[in-house]
Image (cartoon, coloured by chain):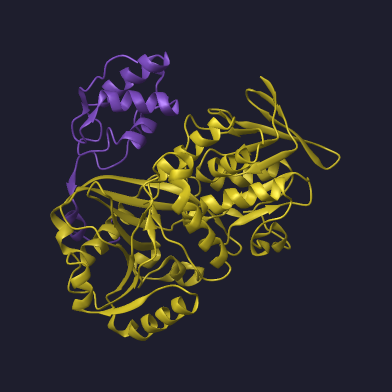
Chain colours: A yellow, B purple
Amino acid sequence: MNRIADVVVIGGGVIGCSVAYYLAKKGAKVTVIEKKGGLCLGASGSNQGGCILTFEPPFRELARESVKLHENLSSEIGYDTEYRKMPDLLCSVDEQRYPDMEKQVQDLRRNGVNARLLEGDEIRELEPTLGKDIVSGIEVPDQAEINPFKLTYGLARAAGKLGTEFLLSTEVKKIETDKGKIASVVTDRGEIKTNFVVNAAGAWSPEIGKMVGITIPIRPQRGQIAVTEPAPYGRWRIIEDTDYPPAAFNKEEAVEISKEPRVKFRVAGTLLQESSGNWLIGSSYDFAGYNNAVTMQIIRCLVRRAIEFMPKLKGVNCIRAWAGLRPLCYVDGLPILSKVDNPSGFIIATGHGADGVALAPITGKLISELIIEKRTSIPIKAFAFSRFRSIKAE
Amino acid sequence: MGKKVNKIICRCEEISEQEIRDAIREFNLETCDEVKRLTRGGMGLCQGRTCEPLIERIIAEETNIKVSEILPFSKRPPARPIKIGFSTEGEVGEG
């Protein structure tokens, strides 16, 4: 198997498939290489399908553009990604946090996000399944949910129709360079000559970086989720625990010594009911290397909090629990959407953490612009690889 | 294309043989997990206990891969459905 491609994309997750689609749309001959026997088998396929965007800088432009792309994608690719508007409801059980909630609403509005503060029974009027313990909430109407499998496979199918080739069960062994430029990708099934490589390998992207001698500061962050049987409760909003948002785990030392299990295990609650009626109870933000097993401690923690929020869930069956590994940048938590100085032609598209599905379309579009037009339609300096002065490998 | 085959393969989610065959053909699927994710077959209460061997056989017929070489559903806990109220018994930190 010896081939030639304009661009080789490493990674068959939602980011790799999106990059392939937007490149193929511009006429590039793309080859996608995926180590596993199918697509969407990493973080892209083990999330809750919430399409919740942050509109705070530096994400504001990315988020706005990604929403526009998501809204038109189903008709563009001729396949329903099941993207649906669904408001987000950030809930608190802590009365003392009311001033924080007020401030959060002001911050959201300042960033141009529609948001309103709710108290007590106002929340239960919107979401009758929520328990009495919830004292305040913030409704953010313009969020969405999506079917991550259909998004990934829809993009892959559209890319395939435009000539993109998918090599599954294929592992990258080596990346050859010539005078500081990408020359070819060597796999266990042959070599592909190319001048561009896009590293979209998610949590595994540091391994690919090593092949060209660069350290990519990405660490796998585990997300554990429990799923229930279909329950007949109304589905209206994505319910989030705002007392423990993922950002609460940023202070490493405080997390280590905390006696509060939810903090120690890095559990932040997000409850989402699928159109099938199944509730997805997520999620953890813990670190366990490349181990994607679920742990009873964390599932117990997640589910216990879910019952506090929605007492009616208590009698519902849990039918499955799973975990995935998100690519998290351990320097600043921001994505890396960037070329590198050496070797030229090596592009990184990863580090989306929990936002890969939400940011996939804009990522694909920007990376295609970086390669074909050599300039991007919105500034991405905040996501440049050059922001890391000196990186310590993990 | 031959006549539609509407036998139910996944009883929990009510997914027909035709839906499974269509997904395999449209997306060149070769593993049970991919079929599950795109059709919901095997996603229900029994988590594929009934339909897994059937889905394997359909994939084998569509792709010419031997049944023994097809990746089965990935297995995840719990082994059988459990009321989520279990979490309120015992200490939160317990395994």
Residue A40 visible at all: no
- The picture places residue B95, in percent across and down from the top left corner, at 29, 53
Quarter of the image for residue A292 reads top left
- The picture places residue A279, in percent across and down from the top left corner, at 25, 52
Q: Is residue A139 left or right of residue A78?
A: left
**Count of numbered badges drawn on the protein:** 0
Quadrant into which the N terminus of chain A falls: top right
- The picture places residue A174, in percent across and down from the top left corner, at 70, 33
Compared to residue B28, the image places residue A364 above or below, namely below
Quarter of the image for residue A141 reads bottom left
Of all residues, the one furthest to the front in this rendering is A75
- Of residue A122 and residue B42, the one placed in the foreground of this image is A122
Compared to residue A100, the image places residue B7 above or below, namely above
- The picture places residue B41, in percent across and down from the top left corner, at 28, 32
- Of residue A188 and residue B24, the one placed in the foreground of this image is B24
Q: Is residue A189 left or right of residue B59?
A: right
Quadrant into which the C terminus of chain A falls: bottom right
Residue in view at x 65 percent, y 64 percent: A382
Residue A111 visible at all: yes
Q: Is residue A13 left or right of residue A342?
A: left
Residue in view at x 26 percent, y 58 percent: A303
